[in-house]
Amino acid sequence: MPRIVVIGGGAAGSALVGELLRPGRPTEADIVWLVGQRAPGRGIAYSTSADHHLLNVRAAGMGLFVDDIGAFLRYTAARGLPVKGADFVPRSWFGDFVESSLARLVSESRRPGRLSVQSHEAVAVRGDATSGYTVTTEDGERWRADAVVLAVGALPPAPLAAVAPEALRSGAYVTDPWQWPTLAQAPERVVVVGTGLTAVDVLLSASTLWPHAQLTAISRHGQLPRTHASHPGEPYPHQQELIDAFEAEPRIRAWLRTARTTLADEDVDWRAVVDGLRGATPGLWRQLDGTERARFVRHLRWLWEPMRHRMPPQTATAIARLRTQGRLKIVAARVLAVSGEGPLDVRIRPRGGEIQRSLTADLVIQATGLTTLAEQTSHRLIGQMIAEDVVRPDRLGLGLCADAQGRLRGADGGAAPTLRAIGTLLRGALWECSGLPEIRAMARVIADDLARELAAPGRRRLGAVTTGTPADDGKRHRGFDADRDSSHSGH
Ligand SMILES: Cc1cc2nc3c(=O)[nH]c(=O)nc-3n(C[C@H](O)[C@H](O)[C@H](O)COP(=O)(O)OP(=O)(O)OC[C@H]3O[C@@H](n4cnc5c(N)ncnc54)[C@H](O)[C@@H]3O)c2cc1C
């Protein structure tokens, strides 16, 4: 039986494992799912229990599978939750839905033991498509694999270069916006670096946790995400012509000119235009050469991201209320230095000005969005794979080099058919890759491709695991029945 090892237990790993388990897949394969320490199914985005952390996609669009987009809405209806398709609901509900979908698929899966869910972190992947791969976990276990899929999400954030070592050591500077320290005292002055969706999440949590704190959010352009309309609008009627125009001249300057002309018409709903570009984005991105991609990242990203990654109206109202109450300031500035041992001194240069000024903060939280810079990452697995030329980092710091189907490129530049990535690591290959709609589409592509690859006549079946410590039952994840029944064969 061929073996597929899926690394990462967030929504991307779930969508892929779900696809692989679905009835009707032409190829049987054992699936080893290495989920790390988090419970499988939720990942970063859907682990939150805060009701103010809402999905930024309407409920009607949040199915886990590409051919069953309405499944989440049916799930909420079956539980008597008052959800309409156009609503933005708490992310934790979606996490519940993913968990329950997986549990059902596992229990319906025909053969017990087909899926083995392991609470291990993968720390190394070695090998190649011809001889197969070996995946090593942090406790030294090794799994031989015919195919490996990296579903590890965004990379761990690294502190901004402007942060002094003593500020980092002080504990008053938080590098990971999803992991806050327990503080002895509620902070009175909180600075959030970033003003995108991650920062908005952080600001809402901080305002709830510390109702008396003064919050300041800083980014170079000081732009909050734009707001979704309360109801979905009509599609832009000339979308295809717009995409054709972009394709005809794949240069950023030309795209900007065309977009400006289009949006200058007051009858055109900019949201419809932006949303209509979403599906075409990977194709358009791949038409740009390296120079044009770099130009987009440098000059246009700041403009595109707040329009594309919008916040729900309820979230916008909550943020506006904080600003009206004087509890939140948004500052357009560059962070020059963060120093001190608490309180911290945050030195900034406001946008368009020369004069620097300082803010004093009891707590600084870095919330600059999804990290994709793979070179010198502290992610152990990705670091190893780059160091040993199994994969290559994207030149613009946008994840790993890959083709449009998530096949990862090694040192020789070839795309490996059985070494894939799904999710944020594909930013450089596709640009649009992190949201659930793109993730579920990629999950289908990879599951179909691997079924074909592994069923190919003459394909050598890999033997059992080469070496390894005895199976550690304590490390198997207890969430799914099939896991308990797993024979753990191959060890
Ligand atoms: C706060 C937030 C809100 C979002 N809201 C939405 C939304 O409303 N709608 C939408 O479509 N998209 C949303 N997104 C986009 C989001 O990226 C995707 O929807 C999805 O959650 C990404 O899942 P993932 O599995 O790729 O990544 P993650 O959720 O980061 O999961 C990756 C998992 O892999 C594990 N892992 C990492 N390395 C290893 C290793 N070496 N071994 C084993 N396990 C490992 C991690 O611990 C983690 O559990 C949101 C993203 C964030 C951050």
Image (spheres, grey):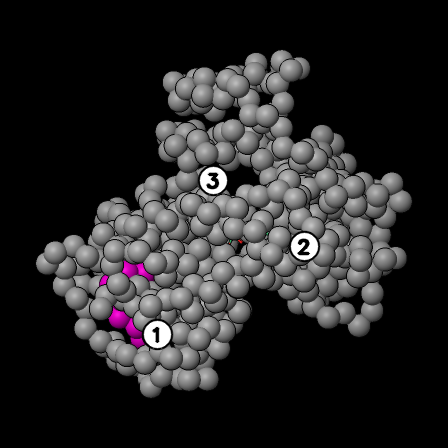
Which mark is nearer the camera, 3 or 2?
2
* Residue at the image position 59 percent from the left and 25 percent from the top: 234
Q: Earlier in the sequence, mark 3 or mark 2?
A: 2
Distance (Cα) linking label 3 and label 1: 36 Å
Q: How far apart are marks 3 and 2 (CA)?
A: 31 Å
- Give the residue at x 75% y 43%: 314
Hey, which quadrant is residue 168 in on the image?
bottom right
Q: Quadrant of the N terminus?
A: bottom left
Residue 468 screen position, x and y as percent: 30, 81
Q: Is residue 228 left or right of residue 108?
A: right
Q: Give the range drawn in magenta.
A: 142-148
Circles 3 and 2, Cβ within 8 Å, touching? The answer is no
Image quadrant of residue 67? Answer: top left
Q: Name the residue under label 2.
A: 81
Q: Can residue 244 be seen in this view?
A: yes
Q: What residue type is disc 3 on?
A: Glu
Label count reads 3
Q: Which amino acid does label 2 sit on?
A: Leu
Q: Confirm if mark 1 falls within 8 A of ligand 1.
A: no
Query: What kind of secondary structure does the magenta stretch mostly adopt?
Result: strand
Residue 256, percent from left and from top: 53, 21
Mark seen at residue 432: 3
The residue where tag 1 is placed is: 112
Question: Is residue 240 placed above or below 196 in the rendered structure?
Answer: above
- Does residue 186 show up magenta in the picture? no
Alpha-carbon span between mark 2 and mark 1 = 33 Å
Task: Give the amino acid type for the residue marked by disc 1 in the picture.
Answer: Pro
**Residue count near mark 2 (Cα–Cα under 10 Å), binned few <14, some 14–19, many ≥20:** few
